[in-house]
Amino acid sequence: MAGTQCCENPPDLNSTGGVGHVEEISGLKCYVSASSNSNIAVILISDVYGYEAPKLRKLADKVAAAGYYAVVPDFFHGDPYNPEDKNRPIQVWIKDHGPDKGFEEAKPIIESLKQKGMCKIGAVGFCWGAKVVALLAQSDEYIQAGAFLHPSFVTEDDINGLKVPVAILGAETDHISPPEVVKKFSEILSSKPEVDSMVKIFPGVSHGWTVRYNEDDAVAVKAAEEAHQDMLTWFQKYVK
């Protein structure tokens, strides 16, 4: 179960961010930021705070600027985790929003993207979203490459079942997927030469650092941007 660390440093959902737009894809609202005429998509799957998080949307814009059709689905149907709702702690909220549901809802979105002309699709998951990507990556039917950033819920069995290239970016201070867990993932992947992988643990950062960093902290911004670039480099290798 995800611990309280995944709920630290919530984003300011009252602020605005992003230059894209919201449209409906397969019955779900999605933030879409698209490079002109791109036929390669990257799905960004949020943490528990949902698809409206400004830094996540700005990251989608960065992905689009790199040449992709970036899509951020609202897998929570307008009901992201709210840390101010004391009657609904994360342990209760997650019962209504399991990653398995996200996996099932991701499949028709992927089909819709293919119908739009997308010839390749990558997916990156943040915390909660990493488990959805892990499930998608059990088959090459859905995505051609995946990335997990400060993952939650991902198990060794998930890693054993991966069928597509995956990058895993972990944090030095992470009670949910601590370095020893990420290193175990790396060991498993090292025994699977048929699945290319990249595993990296970032020093001096904590869970959520890629989408919930302090913009006034130059060190935090630098670490987040390094992770963003690593993710883009991975996709440029496998979904270009």
Image (cartoon, rainbow, N blue to C red):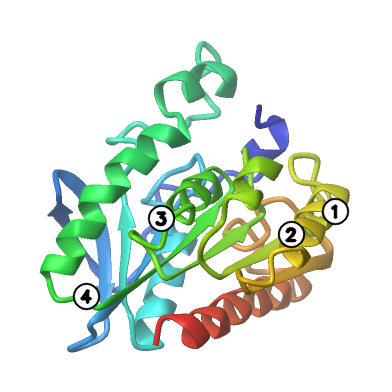
For disc 1, the neighbor class at 10 Å (few under 14, some 14 to 19, many from 20) is some
Task: Locate the C terminus by quadrant.
Answer: bottom left
Q: Earlier in the sequence, mark 1 or mark 2?
A: 2
The circle on residue 170 is 2
For disc 3, the neighbor class at 10 Å (few under 14, some 14 to 19, many from 20) is few
Q: In the image, residue 3 lies at what x, y percent? A: 70, 30
Tell me the kind of residue under disc 2. Answer: Gly
Q: Earlier in the sequence, mark 4 or mark 2?
A: 4
Q: In the structure shown, which secondary structural element does the residue marked by tag 3 occupy?
A: loop
User: Which residue lies most toward the top here?
Assistant: 87
Cβ atoms at labels 3 and 2 below 8 Å apart: no
Q: Is residue 198 above or below residue 56?
A: below
Residue at the disc numbered 4: 118
CA distance for labels 4 and 2? 29 Å
| In this rendering, the label closer to the viewer, 4 or 3 | 4
Query: Total of numbered circles in the picture?
Result: 4
Cβ atoms at labels 1 and 4 below 8 Å apart: no
Q: Earlier in the sequence, mark 1 or mark 3?
A: 3
Q: In the structure shown, which secondary structural element does the residue marked by tag 1 occupy?
A: helix
104 or 202, nearer to the observer: 104
CA distance for labels 3 and 2? 27 Å
Tell me the kind of residue under disc 4. Answer: Met
> Which residue: 48% across, 42% down?
49
Residue at the disc numbered 3: 15
Tell me the kind of residue under disc 3. Answer: Ser
| In this rendering, the label closer to the viewer, 1 or 3 | 1
